[in-house]
Image: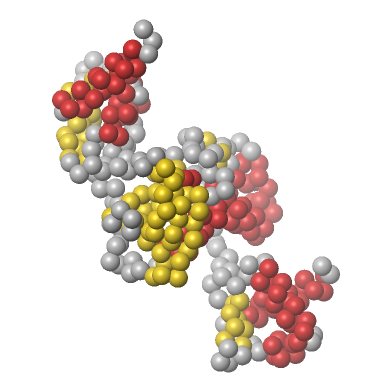
Amino acid sequence: MSVSRIYRLLRLITMLQSGQTFTADELATELQVSRRTVFRDMNVLEMAHIPYYFDRDQGTYRIQQHFFLAPLNLTLNEALSLLVSVRRVRNSALRPLAASSQRAALKLESVLPSAVRQYVGEVMEKLDLVSQPVSRQEGLEDVFDRLLGAIAQGRSCRMTYISFQERKPINLKIDPLRLTFVGRSWYVLGHSHLHAQRRTFKLGRIKKLTVLEDRFDPSVSSVPPEPFGQAWQMIPEGRLHDVHLHFGAKVAGNVAEINWHASQQVTWNADGTMDFKVRVDGLGEISWWVLGYGEHVKVIAPAELANRVCEAAQKVASKYQ
């Protein structure tokens, strides 16, 4: 692409985002080109995913004023934190947003003063963020983007989903309400017409997704601020339990320094052990978490949880006899 055409495209973008509207003739006059050239340039904008709008009644074009954000007055540490978050996170949960975040990082770097850009580059080589292992995120970008658009527009979706609960692929219609990252994976929360209730679906198990023309009222099925209630992680079972765990001194510090649940209470003992109390909806998820600490934790209450952990531990032990 020639320099003159690049300059003309930049002028075209600036004009269309100025807040004014222009007809094709007005654009041709201002840019000193033919109407045919204007239409070719508009096609270039479309291929670059720059959304321009055509008002059929007025015969005018414009670009949404907020499509390109105004320059931000960021401090050095603010710019550094954003760039590190985008560039240095490995196995990131933000994988479906990776392409957009990389473009944002390039734009941010391009407007930094040269001295700041050099400093940030040097510091970034000495900083790293390593996330916990997450589910494979490859190929989720398209599903993520379409679900995000459906949620914003209040449009239903039809999908083919690999259900571990039903142990087979199922076809269903959902009203998507929220995308959320929990544990190691991205999920969509929505009303399932097949199950006649709100369900959670893992994005990695969606094999086919079609956004429908059908619309729903998001306010009718709005998701509360805490969509999973008091579940240990994301699967409420409809019954609250007061859980009391006793952790040995070897792991007590590691457990206590993490905020596992909003209701947790920690009490330290003189011998370095720690008592951990929490009120959770359901025992399924927390039982697997307890098992992960092996001999370094004991379930004090409830008895139902103690029995679950004991039975699971016995089954594990039997595999090695």
- The residue positioned 47% from the left and 35% from the top of the image is 132
Of residue 173 and residue 140, the one placed in the foreground of this image is: 173
- The residue positioned 32% from the left and 43% from the top of the image is 234
> For residue 285, what is the image quadrant?
top left
Is residue 308 depicted above or below 28 in this figure?
above
- The residue positioned 72% from the left and 81% from the top of the image is 39
Quadrant location, the N terminus: bottom right
Residue 109 drawn at (x, y percent): 64, 54
- The residue positioned 63% from the left and 56% from the top of the image is 103
Q: How is the image coloured?
A: secondary structure
Of residue 173 and residue 64, the one placed in the foreground of this image is: 173
Is residue 39 depicted above or below 271 in this figure?
below
Residue 156 in the figure: left or right of residue 28: left
Residue 104 in the figure: left or right of residue 271: right
Q: Is residue 296 visible?
A: no
Residue 131 drawn at (x, y percent): 49, 37
Residue 254 in the figure: left or right of residue 134: left
Is residue 261 depicted above or below 297 in this figure?
below
Residue 196 drawn at (x, y percent): 28, 56
> For residue 289, what is the image quadrant?
top left
| Circle count | 0
Of residue 156 and residue 25, the one placed in the foreground of this image is: 156
Q: Is residue 49 visible?
A: yes
Quadrant location, the C terminus: top left
